[in-house]
Image: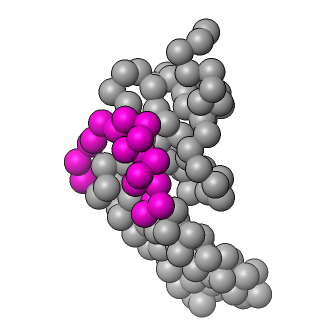
Amino acid sequence: MSKKIFTLKESLELLPRVQELTNTAAEQAEVLVRQLETLPAGEARREFEERYDRLLRTWAAHVMELGVEVKGMWLVDFDSGDGIYYCWHHPERTIEFFHDYDTGFSGRRPLGKLGTS
C-alpha cells in the first residue's frame, strides 16, 4: 500500500475505479445489513458482522492499493502533496470538494474555492 501524490486531473482519472470498488462493496454491505437486521443476537449474527467487517477491510485495502487514502466508510482522500486532499464520498458523482490536511471531512470546501481563503 503505497502513498501517492495526485493532481486533480489524476484524481479524476482514477475516480471511476474507486467508484467501481466502492459501489460494489456498498451494494454488498447493504445486503448484509438487511440480513443482519433479521437475525437475533447469537452466533449467526456474529458471523454476519464478521463478514461485514471483512467486506469493509477488503474494500479499504483495494482502495489503498491504488494510493488513495481511506478516511472513513466510503470516504476517500487523494493527497495533493500541497497541504490539501481532494475528497470524495460515496455516492457523490465526482470529486467536488477538497480540505486541508488538518481539517478533515468537516472542513470540506467546494473545489471552486481552491486557492481562495
Main secondary structure of the magenta stretch = helix
Seen in the picture, residue 48 relative to 73 is either above or below; the reply is below
Seen in the picture, residue 7 relative to 49 is either above or below; the reply is above
Q: Is residue 9 visible?
A: yes
The answer to if 35 sits in the magenta stretch is no
Tell me what residue is drawn at x 50 percent, y 23 percent. Answer: 100
The answer to if 8 sits in the magenta stretch is yes
Q: Is residue 49 left or right of residue 64?
A: right
Seen in the picture, residue 10 relative to 83 is either above or below; the reply is below
Q: Is residue 77 left or right of residue 103?
A: left
Q: How is the image coloured?
A: one colour
Q: Which residues are magenta?
A: 1-18
Tell me what residue is drawn at x 29 percent, y 58 percent. Answer: 65
Q: Quadrant of the C terminus?
A: top right
Q: Position of residue 72 (x, y in %)?
A: 54, 49
Q: Position of residue 89 (x, y in %)?
A: 60, 50
**Front position in the image: 95 or 85:** 95
Q: Is residue 88 left or right of residue 21?
A: right
Q: Is residue 105 left or right of residue 63?
A: right
Q: Position of residue 97 (x, y in %)?
A: 60, 35
